[in-house]
Image (tube, rainbow, N blue to C red):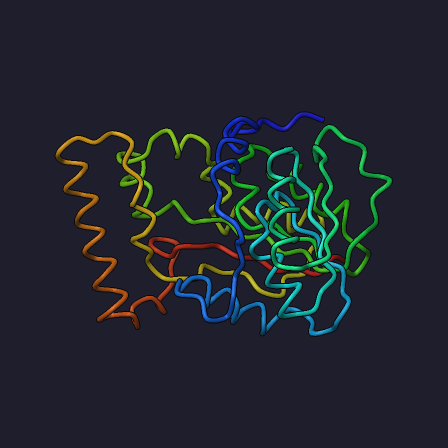
């Protein structure tokens, strides 16, 4: 099954090889976006110990660790990167979490031998593929009937797009802008008859997105410095501004659905 991947396997293996462990999301997170995501999880995900939850593209497993410890879910992960799977296992061992990790390619491997899960999710996965319908269908293939699907992506559209294309064009080339358009999600929602529990842009404006600078011209360095100063202003003095959300500036797009 072919799905044009924008970020090749070597890109991910290089990234996971450098990751520091242990990695874990906690409620006392310093990131405003992470705290807002946790609030949404609290509001819309079931509170029942032992629910099976599968993360797709899960390395290194920081959110899955949160669900295992805080929600008492039974954690599973799938990743096609051998290094990514190694990091997942190492991370769960360090955190003393019992989890199952599958080293499989979602698109070319046979998934029929895997169990089906109460919740299937990915946070920062579908935007690396061209065919959104196909990648969502693979999520649903692992989901129980009447299960919950959760999808999240960083939002590099709106005012972030032109800035990131200037500062980090290589990084941007690995992302599909259509995956960051809330309206575009209506296509797969209708095709797969998904019932929306929650969908929206969250996290407010995130200046941290502009830390990366691939082309270090003087102009780009000054632009990066501007956003660094803005980050401190929003964090320390005007944090309330992060609560205003829009496709034009918010950091993240999240959807939670019921499979019908």
Place of residue 191 in the rendered image (x, y in percent of width and height, measured from the top left):
69, 46
Q: Of residues 17 and 139, which is closer to you in this image? A: 17
Question: From what the image shows, is residue 23 above or below residue 81?
Answer: below
Q: Residue at x 77, y 52 (%)?
A: 143
Q: Residue at x 61, y 43 (%)?
A: 57
> Count of labels shown?
0
Q: Quadrant of residue 97?
A: bottom right
Place of residue 223 in the rendered image (x, y in percent of width and height, measured from the top left):
18, 43
- Horizontal side, residue 182 vs residue 83: left or right: left
Q: Residue at x 52, y 46 (%)?
A: 124
- Horizontal side, residue 235 vs residue 140: left or right: left
Which quarter of the figure is the C terminus placed in?
Answer: bottom right
- Horizontal side, residue 21 vs residue 74: left or right: left
Place of residue 127 in the rendered image (x, y in percent of width and height, measured from the top left):
52, 40
Q: Of residues 147 and 95, which is closer to you in this image? A: 95
Q: Of residues 15 and 182, which is closer to you in this image? A: 15
Place of residue 196 in the rendered image (x, y in percent of width and height, measured from the top left):
63, 61
- Horizontal side, residue 147 vs residue 70: left or right: right
Question: From what the image shows, is residue 140 above or below residue 105?
Answer: below
Which quarter of the figure is the N terminus placed in?
Answer: top right
Question: From what the image shows, is residue 16 above or below residue 10?
Answer: below
Q: Residue at x 36, y 62 (%)?
A: 204
């Amino acid at each position: 099954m072919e799905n044009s991947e924008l970020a090749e396997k070597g890109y991910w293996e290089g990234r996971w090889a450098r990751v520091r462990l242990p990695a874990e999301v906690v409620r006392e997170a310093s990131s405003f976006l992470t705290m807002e995501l946790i609030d949404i999880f609290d509001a819309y995900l079931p509170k029942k110990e032992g629910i099976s939850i599968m993360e797709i593209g899960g390395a290194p497993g920081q959110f899955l660790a949160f669900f295992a410890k805080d929600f008492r879910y039974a954690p599973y992960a799938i990743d096609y990167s051998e290094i990514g799977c190694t990091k997942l296992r190492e991370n769960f061992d360090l955190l003393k979490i019992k989890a199952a990790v599958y080293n499989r390619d979602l698109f070319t491997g046979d998934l029929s031998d895997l169990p089906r899960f109460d919740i299937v999710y990915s946070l920062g996965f579908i935007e690396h593929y061209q065919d959104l319908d196909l990648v969502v269908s693979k999520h649903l293939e692992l989901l129980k009937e009447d299960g919950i699907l959760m999808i999240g992506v960083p939002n590099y559209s709106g005012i972030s797009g032109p800035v990131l294309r200037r500062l980090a064009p290589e990084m941007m080339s690995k992302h599909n802008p259509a995956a960051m358009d809330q309206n575009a999600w209506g296509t797969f929602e209708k095709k797969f008859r998904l019932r929306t529990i929650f969908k929206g842009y969250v996290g407010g404006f995130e200046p941290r997105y502009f830390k990366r600078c691939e082309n270090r011209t003087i102009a780009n360095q000054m632009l990066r410095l501007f956003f660094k100063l803005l980050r401190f202003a929003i964090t320390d003095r005007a944090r309330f501004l992060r609560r205003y959300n829009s496709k034009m500036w918010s950091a993240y797009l999240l959807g939670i659905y019921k499979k019908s």
